[in-house]
Image: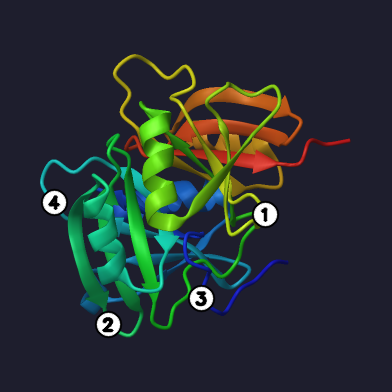
Amino acid sequence: MPNRDSKWPAGTPCWVDAATPDVEAATAFYGAVLGWTFHDTGEDYGHFHMCMAGGRSAAGIGKIQMEGQPAAWTVYLACDDADATVRVITDNGGTVHVGPMDIPEVGRMAIASDPTGAVFGVWQANPMPGIEIYNEPGGLVWEDARLADPGAGKAFYAAVFGFEYTPIEGAPQDYGTFAVGGGEPLGGMGGLMGAPEGTPSHWIPYFGVADVKAAVVAAESGGGTVLMPVIDTPYGRMSTLADPFGAVFAVHSEVPA
């Protein structure tokens, strides 16, 4: 089971959390769909809930903090210095919405958007690395940036985080994987891929499950919506869903033999 206790390399998707209007209902939904258990961090942290898989941190769920803020998942990218990263973000046409700010005894964070409008987070571990379990059921297994202007987005993330891109044969021309420092693919980046007209740029987290079809049934039973039905691809079985409040995520498993 892939676990991590040390900080993630800069540029790596290292954390993901959901903002929701109803934490109790959201934890009930995701517990049924992804098999998570939850730890309430208490009043000092706004009753932010850590989502646990195999006893290790997989994600977080917290209450919406600003009026008019939509329910959504935010993907965070690791950095060594949040303040310096924020300066590079603004220098390259991005917008900083929150921070940088300290989460006491945990780390330093900021929330920003790229020049196409996709919102993402920045995480500086101090000492919490972010996700402690990955590439397993209940853990983060992939991330996609779906951008209205993929060229502008790729230039931005290359300048800020050092992303390098590799096309995928058979995928849309503007879609490929991203990596840092010649390493393994960390996620995908491309256009909006057939999303309804008017869909804004966004990041989507993919969570591992043992059975995609069972996860979809649980999501529908819990008031969620299927945005992309179950499909089998050369890279696994997957489906895109929205929770009862509209936060979008995907589920993934290996294709059964």
The quarter of the displayed image where residue 54 is located:
bottom right
Residue receiving disc 1:
184
- Indicate which label's residue lies in the foreground, 3 or 1: 1
Viewer-proximal residue among 128 and 212: 128
Please indicate whether residue 132 sits to the left or right of residue 23 in the image.
Answer: right
In the rendered image, is residue 213 in sight? no
Q: Nearer the viewer, residue 40 or 122?
A: 122
According to the image, label 2 marks what residue? 104
The reply to whether dot 1 and dot 4 touch (C-beta < 8 Å) is no
What residue type is disc 4 on?
A: Met
Specify the amino acid type for callout 3.
Answer: Lys
Q: Which mark is residue 81?
A: none
Q: Which secondary structure lies at badge 3?
A: loop
Q: Secondary structure at mark 2?
A: loop
Cβ atoms at labels 2 and 1 below 8 Å apart: no
**Quadrant into which the N terminus falls:** bottom right
Dot 2 and dot 4 residues touching (CB under 8 Å): no
What is the three-letter code of the residue carrying label 2?
Answer: Pro
Which quadrant of the rendered structure holds the C terminus? top right
Label pair 3/4, CB-CB below 8 angstroms:
no
Q: Is residue 62 left or right of residue 126?
A: left
Q: Amino acid at mark 1?
A: Glu
* Frontmost residue, 129 versus 90: 90
Marks 2 and 3, how far apart in space? 17 Å
Q: For mark 3, what is the residue?
A: 7
